[in-house]
Image (cartoon, rainbow, N blue to C red):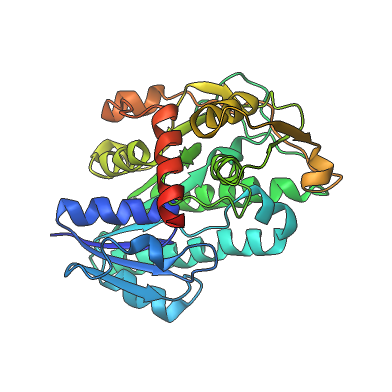
Amino acid sequence: MAQILITGGAGFIGSHLAEALIARGDQVTVVDDESTGDVDNLAAIRRHARFSYVSGSVADRPLVARLVAEADEVYHLAAAVGVQLIASNPIRTIETNIYPTELLLAELRRQQQQGRQVKLFLASTSEVYGKNPKPSWTEEDDLVFGPTTRARWSYGVSKAIDEFLALAHWREHKLPVVVARFFNVVGPRQTGSYGMVLPRFVDAALAGRPLVVHDDGRQVRCFGHVADVVRAVLDLMATPVAAGRVFNIGSDQPVTILELAQRVIAVVNPSLNIEFQSYAEAYSADFEDVRSRVPDLTRLRQTISFQPRYTLDDAIREVVAWKRSMSD
């Protein structure tokens, strides 16, 4: 039975990961400051004998030192989330992403020096590719960011620094780290409060409101089901050759945002309308978006034989059912 620590484990992906690890038979500790997570996401396992919850910040050095000293594996998911939060709070975004990662790595290195090798999973993001113009992105592609005068790029840059830090610890000390760049992940428990597009569309549809699509809706994204993403994370952590490497995780089936809205309408209420809103109205006058975000999953498939089990339509139906159950 492994001792697992999950930072940000009360969040959308973290709560699903915690459930999967409990189901696997591990002892799981979650630490979360509940700034964007919700302890209710952990309701299914909150009272499980092999689960413990710590309300606290991963910027708290004594707390992190104590929790890491008890862990065999650490899954670092705590981060700023959502386009809305990034656009409105760039200072919080940068500080939340960089300092806790630096602190965690220092404590893991301390454990290594004491003879304990604790493996780290670092959750990164497709945002690190910035606005690279390639039609699909591989892990070795260049990172292409906009100017520092546009706060939108602070998220991707700060997560890229996290990656550099983690990989430097692998390169210099052989600290076992696995880095994964999540593309759009969807499923039950995801909130639309920070700009996440699918739950935002579902919320509007269930309320009978028009679905608001930003810009012209022709932006291309790939939406991976959270269960497939969690399974890939666990398989990578169980695969020794994954250490010291970076992996794209998600779906590689592209869909436009307009088509996503149309699919949600088809499931909830075909009579609903779509309205368009400019980025300036939604975020700020200097907001830049990426027209296409499609991962190349070759490395992931070669390493763990990854094959998704869920489609986007499966995810839409599950999110709709979950949202309805929450309002009953």
Q: Nearer the viewer, residue 135 or 307?
A: 307
Q: Quadrant of residue 134?
A: top right
In the image, residue 87 sits, relative to residue 186, either above or below, namely below
Residue sticking out furthest to the right = 285
Whether residue 13 is visible: yes
In the image, residue 157 sits, relative to residue 296, either above or below, namely below
In the image, residue 135 sits, relative to residue 130, either above or below, namely above
- Judge left or right: residue 20 versus residue 63: left
Residue sticking out furthest to the front = 271
In the image, residue 86 sits, relative to residue 62, either above or below, namely above
Image quarter (top left, top right, bottom left or bottom right) of the C terminus:
bottom left
Q: Nearer the viewer, residue 104 or 4?
A: 4
Whether residue 175 is visible: no
Residue located 41% across and 76% down the image: 55
- Judge left or right: residue 91 versus residue 322: right
Image quarter (top left, top right, bottom left or bottom right) of the N terminus:
bottom left
Q: Nearer the viewer, residue 8 or 123?
A: 8
Task: Give residue 70's position: percent from left, percent from top.
Answer: 25, 71
Residue located 47% across and 40% down the image: 185
Total tally of numbered discs in the picture: 0
- Judge left or right: residue 323 versus residue 126: left
